[in-house]
Image: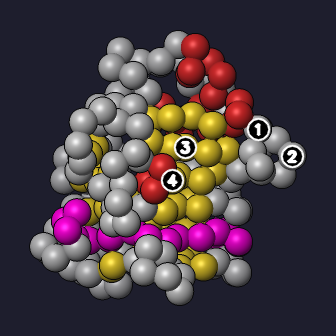
Amino acid sequence: QTVASNVVVVNTTADENDGDTSSIAALIATPGGTGISLREAILATNNTANVGGNPDQIRFNIAGAGPHTINVLSALPNLAEAVVIDGWSEPDYAGTPIIELNGAGAGGVSGLVLSANGSTVRGLVINRFSSVGILLNIVTNSTIVGNYIGTDVGGTVDLGNTGTGITVNGGSLNIIGGTTAAERNVISGNNSH
């Protein structure tokens, strides 16, 4: 079980970076103007060492009924420390992803780039990025489950990423999808899968 200080909760759909991202504890103490954004949470986890071999946790608790769309305005930071980005943690999650990363306004970038071993991305909708939806860049033991990549939050409308849905660039022992319905990824509408 992870240490509580290694958990940060995203509570806004704003794509801002005006909180103290020097560590998870600092961001919790001094969040941005509208709360804690995904961008701030990634920066804070990158600046916080993993404790006891456990990855940091980025969870969600965004007010109101989902879906919750984060309009990404520029490249998100690479995931440089092992982290679990857990869309399943959103209180109104009911078996299908409702946290959407919309990359239409982000420029020529990928959605999420994993550059640390042992990370997990689950329960997100990642669409409309001008490059790859999720890039695993020479990493091992990472897990990508329960995501919709290249579709809307319903998993039926083509909102593809211009590049591939998921690219594994080297590395080994990575898991894409799982055996339960919740763990399966929907990868569709991208330039290629």
* Residue position for label 3: 58
At horizontal 26% and vertical 81% (from top left) the residue drawn is 188
Q: Is residue 81 magenta?
A: no
* Residue position for label 4: 86
Q: Earlier in the sequence, mark 2 or mark 1?
A: 1
Q: How far separated are the C-alphas under marks 1 and 3?
A: 13 Å
Q: Earlier in the sequence, mark 2 or mark 3?
A: 2
- Disc assigned to residue 3: 1
Crowding at mark 4 (Cα within 10 Å: few <14, some 14-19, many 20+)? many
Quarter assignment of residue 160: bottom left
Residue range (magenta): 138-154
Q: Earlier in the sequence, mark 1 or mark 3?
A: 1
Q: Disc 1 residue type?
A: Val
* Residue position for label 2: 52
Crowding at mark 3 (Cα within 10 Å: few <14, some 14-19, many 20+)? many
Q: Disc 2 residue type?
A: Gly
Q: How far separated are the C-alphas under marks 2 and 1?
A: 8 Å
Callout 1: SS: loop
Q: Disc 3 residue type?
A: Ile
Q: Is residue 144 magenta?
A: yes
At horizontal 76% and vertical 38% (from top left) the residue drawn is 3
Across and down, in percent, residue 32 comes to 41, 18
Across and down, in percent, residue 89 comes to 48, 49
Q: Measured along the vertical axis of the image, is residue 136 above or below residue 31?
A: below
